[in-house]
């Protein structure tokens, strides 16, 4: 029986999910958890038949299924066995075309995928405010056909596998760039992004054990569960039952840590608050993950059990322009309603870069997000919420709008309104205007589809 994508809280050990997990690539429903990753950006140059043959072999020998990923994780927990390199392969629309395949089969939900990240369609309400492709790093300015991801806890193992893959591609593709990512952790061992804030919190969850862990932690005010259809779609290029794929947004985001820290200090001085609180007003969480909605001081830890209604309806604890509030209103979006709002969520699998790159001093995030519809999910979040200075307070009076997402917005800086005193200032009166932003910059990327293993192995 085919898997119903409306299901959530699934138990991978149940027989009805075995085929789905065997056919699905890893790292989609659950992060693989490896420390080191190399992302190989590919451009096919040889004959399509030769590229298809390489993909078949790579899928058969190297690509990790969701089932293998879960089995390796269980073996590591039980016996300390590390498992093999986690490998995946994603294709862009131009990549499908280079292989001689029809992208029209992706239907209406695949329109943004077919357009690609470089397209800047005209839209007054939700414009694309990313830097123009001519301003991206050179490897991303031309066509990108595929993205190969190789991950392991050992950098040496990842590099050895990378050399093997590159050698195998020699006659069929060029590799314009290889991005190296390394997980960063704080003193508690929690993953952080380059600005130092706990990352990968508040993710949509699909598997029973992950949801049980949240319930045991006392999360009862926010439901992190998500149906499989939030992230999975039928692979249109295979007829095999329970063969799903996912759309992948990849963005290389440079982070100006020195500039960010200096501006946080300036914001703290402007508001008369501590630097930790100023940073939390920007991000929506303190560096330890504690939500600024719940308290004006850090120390609570990476709590996920909060909502903006009724805790903070006026944005005086967590500003409307704080990153986590812009990107996920947790039921406070009256224009959409909770059910529709939850359909916009994305599944983030990013990894920091910068520890071993060739350009000294540059750090950032290799942002990766899975979803079932790029237009409905990533592009809607980015353009209608994050890069919209009038969202969620649609005001025409200067100084009374929300402002840009202070952390990741790509908008030409739009001034934000900040509370003079945490939790006490009025909705408009007493706010201070302060322009914060510009410390995260898109350096390149592309939209991909992560196909099912049956498609790859029979290409």
Image: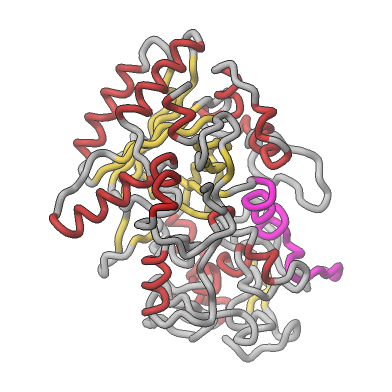
Q: Is residue 427 above or below residue 400?
A: below
Q: Quadrant of residue 404?
A: bottom right
Horizontally, residue 71 falls left or right of residue 363, namely left
Residue 215: x percent and y percent?
Answer: 42, 77
* Residue 28 seen in the current view: yes
Q: Tell whether position 63 is magenta.
A: no
Horizontally, residue 201 falls left or right of residue 153, namely right
Residue 383: x percent and y percent?
Answer: 70, 52
Instruction: Name the residue furthest bottom.
Output: 424
Query: In terms of depth relative to the viewer, which is nearer, 211 or 410?
Result: 211
Residue 144: x percent and y percent?
Answer: 53, 26
User: Could you tell me which residue is drawn at 48 percent across and 36 percent down?
Assistant: 452
Instruction: Name the residue furthest left.
Output: 79
Query: In terms of depth relative to the viewer, which is nearer, 321 or 65?
Result: 65
Residue 281: x percent and y percent?
Answer: 54, 74
Horizontally, residue 410 falls left or right of residue 194, namely right
Q: Which residues are magenta?
A: 374-399
Query: In terms of depth relative to the viewer, which is nearer, 236 or 307?
Result: 236
User: Could you tell me which residue is drawn at 40 percent across and 57 percent down?
Assistant: 193
Instruction: Name the residue furthest right.
Output: 396
* Residue 399 seen in the current view: no
User: Could you tell me which residue is drawn at 54 percent across and 17 percent down?
Assistant: 99
Label count reads: 0
Q: Tell whether position 388 is magenta.
A: yes
User: Could you tell me which residue is drawn at 23 percent across and 40 percent down?
Assistant: 84
């Amino acid at each position: 029986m085919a898997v119903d994508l409306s299901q959530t809280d699934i138990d991978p050990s149940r027989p009805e999910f075995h085929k789905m997990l065997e056919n699905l690539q890893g790292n989609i429903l659950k992060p693989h958890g490896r420390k080191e990753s190399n992302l190989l950006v590919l451009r096919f140059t040889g004959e399509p038949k030769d590229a298809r043959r390489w993909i078949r072999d790579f899928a058969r020998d190297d690509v990790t299924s969701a089932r293998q990923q879960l089995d390796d994780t269980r073996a590591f927990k039980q016996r300390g066995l590390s498992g093999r390199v986690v490998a995946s392969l994603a294709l862009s629309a131009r990549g499908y075309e280079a292989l001689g395949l029809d992208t029209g089969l992706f239907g209406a939900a695949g329109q943004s995928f077919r357009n690609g990240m470089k397209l800047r369609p005209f839209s007054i309400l939700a414009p694309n405010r990313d830097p123009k492709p001519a301003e991206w790093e050179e490897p991303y300015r031309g066509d990108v056909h595929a993205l190969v991801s190789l991950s392991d806890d050992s950098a040496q193992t990842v590099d050895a596998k990378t050399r093997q893959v590159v050698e195998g591609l020699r006659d069929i593709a060029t590799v314009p760039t290889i991005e190296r990512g390394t997980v960063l952790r704080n003193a508690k061992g929690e993953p952080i992004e380059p600005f130092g804030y706990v990352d990968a919190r508040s993710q949509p969850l699909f598997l029973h054990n992950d949801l049980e862990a949240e319930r045991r932690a006392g999360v009862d005010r926010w439901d992190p569960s998500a149906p499989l259809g939030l992230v999975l779609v039928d692979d249109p290029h295979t007829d095999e039952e329970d063969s799903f794929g996912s759309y992948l947004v990849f963005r290389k985001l440079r982070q100006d840590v020195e500039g960010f820290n200096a501006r946080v200090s300036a914001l703290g001085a402007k508001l008369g608050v501590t630097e930790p609180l100023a940073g939390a007003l920007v991000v929506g969480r303190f560096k330890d993950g504690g939500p600024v909605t719940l308290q004006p001081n850090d120390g609570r830890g990476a709590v996920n059990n909060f909502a903006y209604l009724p805790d903070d309806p006026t944005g005086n604890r967590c500003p409307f322009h704080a990153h986590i509030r812009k990107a996920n209103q947790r039921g406070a979006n009256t224009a959409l309603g909770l059910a529709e709002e939850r359909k916009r969520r994305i599944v983030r699998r990013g990894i920091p870069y910068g520890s071993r790159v060739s350009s000294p001093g540059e750090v950032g995030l290799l942002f990766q997000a899975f979803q079932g519809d790029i237009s409905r999910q990533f592009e809607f979040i980015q353009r209608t919420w994050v890069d919209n200075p009038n969202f969620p307070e649609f005001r025409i009076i200067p100084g009374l709008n929300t402002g840009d997402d202070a952390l990741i917005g790509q908008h030409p800086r739009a001034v934000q309104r900040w509370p003079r005193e945490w939790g006490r200032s009025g909705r408009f009166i007493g706010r201070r205007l302060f322009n914060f932003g510009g410390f995260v910059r898109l350096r390149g990327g592309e939209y991909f589809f992560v196909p099912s293993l049956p498609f790859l192995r029979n290409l």
